[in-house]
Image (tube, rainbow, N blue to C red):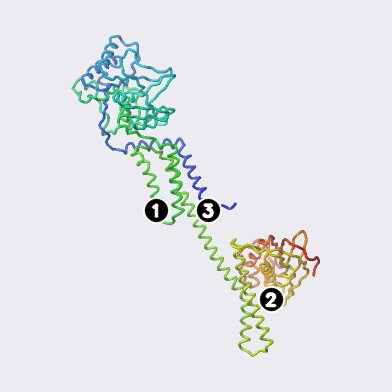
Amino acid sequence: MRRTPGVLYAALLGAVFGFALLAGWTTLAAQIDSDVYDFLFRLDQRTPPPATSVIYGIDERTLRQGGGLAGLRGILADGLERLRPCLPKAVALDIVLADETAAKEENDRLIWALGRLPNVVLASTLTAHGWENPLAQLPRKATGHVHSDPDPYDNVVRQISLEKVAGRERQWALALETFKAMHPEAVIEEDPGGLTIDGVRLPSPREAARPLLVKFRPSTAPVPEVTFAELAEKDQCGAFREKAVFVGITAQSAAQDRHSTPLSFGQTMVGVAINANAYETLASRAFLRPAGNLETVGLALAITFAAGAIFYLLSGWMAYASAAVLLVTVHALTWAAFRQGIVFPYTTPLAAVWLGTAATASFQYFVTRRQLHKAEADRSRYQQAIHFVAHEMRSPLTAIQGSSELMGRYKLPEEKRAQMAQMIHSESQRLGRLIQTFLDVERLSEGQMELAREPFAMGDVVRASMERAQPLAERKRMTMTLQSLDECTLKGDRELMEYAVYNLLTNAVKYSPVETQVTVFTALGGGTLRLSVRDQGIGMDEKEARKIFTKFYRTKRAEQSGEAGTGIGLSIVEQIVVHHGGRIEVQSSPGAGSCFTMVLPVEDALESGGK
């Protein structure tokens, strides 16, 4: 089946769309999307609301003063006791207090300090053996896990899991438990697809451990931090009042949970700070939402369609200017969506817009170029066709002009005048038929006309064509012989078939020397008629014979004979024969003449035998 440019164009757009989706699912694309996500994070410099949390850190100085990690529980007990008068609203410890070997005195001091604080949230961690929870005797309001989720490709923390499950035990994240302690009035509803916090939907599927994209606060407005040593030296209670206090180790030498974040700029962030930023994300209720698969596919489809529409409806500079606008728009789209809290992948729409514009622009270029070449070919073709018509019309016009001139200049006998008038009438009819034949052949070749399907006697066609060609043969003192003629009926267009036979006869006369012979003979059998025209002319080599039916091809014999040929006559003959369900053959060699044979299907045999 012949495919139209529109079908090919649609197939091209479909291929672009499919390739864009495949490109967006690769590992390289995932890394590019993550890098772009980090860049957008750094680009977004909007000032967030004031922080409602504070990091209460155990730094290097605090560790040295307290005797190092061995005295961690004593350090915690002292620091928490100093924190109590500052009236925090909730205290979250990002330190897993599961060690049962600590001194009883230190444990008792820590229990006493924790018991005097409001809304204490302790940390747990998930190991290969299950949950490692804080000691049962430690007072707390809730327990939450402290796991971050670093990206496996670049170890950058962009999200945390709000939910972790091991066996039959589930733990919410420390940040979420702290949020619940800070906002006991908040209504949190969970379903398999996410959480709803005070009516704000957080898409976080259960099967993906309920991920939360952390909106890390910019360096211009970070989560405030006060160390244990600073609070011991100076009253800074104002920083803690009615805040969520995240207590953790911030010392470079002791903090084991340091990770890069989108805002790290080459530096890492301790786990307690990551959890504090996660809490601020929950407290703001302004969540970042990853675009769904259907949204991504729909965006890629829309971009591909837009690129296709541009180069389908427009051309020239308008098409390329519109494509440039589309490119800029798609590049800015990810940023605009990020500003609205929607995280679209970057690679898929980027692949769709670049591949779409490149492919459709190339398609338009090559189609336009092809159309230009076709227009130039059609122009040349019609110029040749006009030349052909003019050439073919010369004979009847010469006869009409000569006869009319004689009738006007001389006083001729009535019989002679009648004879010339008849000739003028006959030649004018011949001229009309010639023009109509040419137009019919052109319409046939363009598929604009159906071939007539009427029975006609082939013998009448051959005799009429020979009678018309006879005067041309007589001028060159040539003999035109009908060697045999099998009478039969063909089905088709008689006028076109007569034109084909006449063309073969006139070509035989045209390319033959004077005083030679043109022979016409037929052979009927096997449901076909073979009509041959043989001459004793210049002939052709095998290479020329293969090209003889090509439109506008000029043979060497035309140059050698000095005859003005257009290179279109035999191509028309071939079209006529093919449209009648037949084929045309040629046998020729240089200096030995040529034999053209039309092989045509026979409708009915009238008689057998030569005449």
The residue mark sitting in front, 1 or 3, is 3
- Identify the residue under disc 1: 321
Secondary structure at badge 3 equals helix
Which of the two residues, 173 or 535, is positioned nearer the viewer here? Answer: 173
The residue where tag 3 is placed is 5
User: In the figure, 359 relative to 595: above or below?
Assistant: above
Judged from the image, the secondary structure of the residue bearing numbered disc 2 is: helix
From mark 1 to mark 3, how far is it between C-alphas? 23 Å
Q: Position of residue 348 (x, y in %)?
A: 44, 41
Crowdedness near tag 1: few (<14), some (14–19) or many (≥20) residues, C-alpha within 10 Å? few
Which mark, residue 472?
2
Q: Residue furthest bottom?
A: 411
Left or right of 343, for residue 423:
right
Q: State how far apart marks 3 and 2 are (Cα).
A: 48 Å
| Residue 452 against residue 53 in the figure, above or below | below
Dot 3 surroundings within 10 Å: few (below 14), some, or many (20 or more)?
Answer: few
